[in-house]
Image: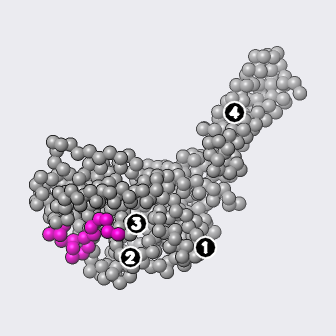
Amino acid sequence: MRFDNVRTGVIAGLIVPLIGLFLYSVFIVTVLRPELELGFFLRGMVFGIRGNIAPVLSLSLLADVVLFFAFDQRRMLKAMRGVIGAMFAYGAVIVLLLLLWGKRLCVIAGEASGDLHGGNLVRALFAQAGQEELKVRAWGGDHMQAAGAEVVKHYRDLAFMGFTQVLMNLRTILRNIKECKADILAFKPDAIILIDYPGFNLRIAEFAHAHGIRVIYYISPQVWAWKAGRVKAIKRNVDDMYVILPFEKQWYAEHGMEVEFVGHPLLDALPVHSEVRSEAADMKPVVALLPGSRTQEITRMLPVMLSTVKHFPEVAFQVAAAPSVPEALYRNIIGDASVELVSNGTYDLLKTAKAALVTSGTATLETALIGTPEAVCYGGGAVNVWLAKRFIKVPFISLVNLIMGREVVRELIQKDMAPKELRKELDQLLNDDAYRSRMLADLQELREKLGGPGASAHVADRVWKSLYARP
C-alpha cells in the first residue's frame, strides 16, 4: 500500500497513533508504574490527553511530515489531508469517551480536619486524570474548593460538637441530611467518599448504599473508642474502608471486616514543617495556643489558656485562628491581653513554637508530628463529660497517646484543665530540659509509627481502580 492518497493517509493517521499509544502505555506499566494494570492504564490514558495522547499524536504527525518531504509532494499532500482528517476523528472520539467514561464523585467532610484531608485527596485524584474526566462535588471547605471541588455546603454549617449542641441544633442537622440526600440524587455520583464525621456520614452511607452508589470511607469513625456497634452498619453499607491509624486494621479484622491501612494523611500535609525547627536567639520563645476550630470550644478553652499569659512575661504567646471562625470572636476573648492572633499560619506557628497548649482533636496529632512539645487540653459541658465517661472505652483522649499506647503528652481534662495545672505543665514544657527531651524523642517515634507520606495518592489510586472495575 503506497502512502500517496487520502485513504492511506487516513489509515496511517489512525494506526500510527494507536501503535504509539500502546507502546507508551506498555512502557509506563512495565517500567515507570509497574503497580498499574495495563487495561486500567490504557483506559485512563484517554483522559490524559494533554499529558499523554497529545505528544503521541504530535509525533505521528511529525513522522507523516517527514514522509511528505521524502516522497512526491503532490501525492503526499493528498495523504496528509487524510492524516489531518484522522486527527479530527480522534478528537471527536476523545470528546465522546469523555462524556461516556467521565466520573462523578461526591466527597463529604464535616470538620476542618476532614476538609484538609479531603483537599489533599481531591488534588491527588485530579493529578491522575484532569478536569475533563472527573467532576467532584463536595460538602467541605476551603481546602477542597482550592483543590478543584465544587463545594456546595461549607463545614461551618455542619459542625456541632457534643451531645448538648447536637440536641439544640437537631432540626438543622436533620435538614442538612435531607439536603445532602437530595443533592446526591441530583448529582448522580459514581461513588461517594465519606471522611470521618460519623453521625452525619453513616446516615449518608446507608442512603447511598440503598441507591446502588459505591460507598468509600476514608478515615474511619473512632468506633474503637465508643459506639462499637456501628461497625455492623459500616460492614453493611461501606464498600471500601481506608484507615489511617495502625491499630485500626487489627480492630476491624477482629470484627470481621477487611480494611486497608494507608498511613496518616497528615504526613502529606506536614512534610515541609517537620524537618527544621528555628528559634532566633534574640527573640522571645513562642508558645502556641490552639483553642479549637468550633465556636463552642473556643469560647470554653481560650479564656483558660489565656490565664497563663501573665505568668510568663518572657514568652510570646500566639493564638492560632481557625479560618472558619470570625476574627471578632477571638478579639473579644483576648481583650487587652498581650497575645498575637495568627491567621492562616498554624503550621508555621507550630514550627517555630517552643511549646503549645492544644485543644483535644486532630490538632494534637498535627502538633506532635511537627515536633512541638505540647499539653492536650479538654473541658466540656457536664452532660458531655458524663456521657464520655460512661460510653468511651479508651485510656486516653489524645491520638498521640492512643497510637503510642502510653502517655507521651499530658492530658489536662475537665478539673485538671485549670489555670494552676496549666501553668505548671507549661513551665515544664518550657524549662525542664529532661522532660522536653523525652517528649521530643517520643514524638519522633510516633512519626515513624505512622509511616511515610503518600496516603492521599494511595487512596486516589484505589478509588480510580474501584471506579474502573465497575461495569
Q: CA distance from mark 2 to mark 4?
A: 59 Å
Residue at (43, 60) in percent of width and height: 449
Residue located beneath label 2 in the image: 394
Q: Which residues are magenta?
A: 406-422
Q: Is residue 461 visible?
A: yes
The N terminus: image quadrant: top right
Residue at (35, 47) in percent of width and height: 275
Provide residue 452's location: percent of width, then percent of height.
46, 53
The C terminus: image quadrant: bottom right
Helix, strand or loop at mark 4: helix
Provide residue 284's location: percent of width, then percent of height.
16, 48
Quadrant location of residue 105? bottom right
Please state which of the two labelled residues, at mark 1 or mark 2, is closer to the viewer. Answer: 2
Amino acid at the residue labelled 4: Leu
| Numbered mark located on residue 309 in the image | none
Q: Is residue 74 left or right of residue 471?
A: right
Q: CA distance from mark 1 to mark 3?
A: 35 Å
Picture layout, residue 268 above or below residue 51: below
Residue located beneath label 1 in the image: 210
Q: Is residue 457 left or right of residue 40?
A: left
Residue located beneath label 3 in the image: 403
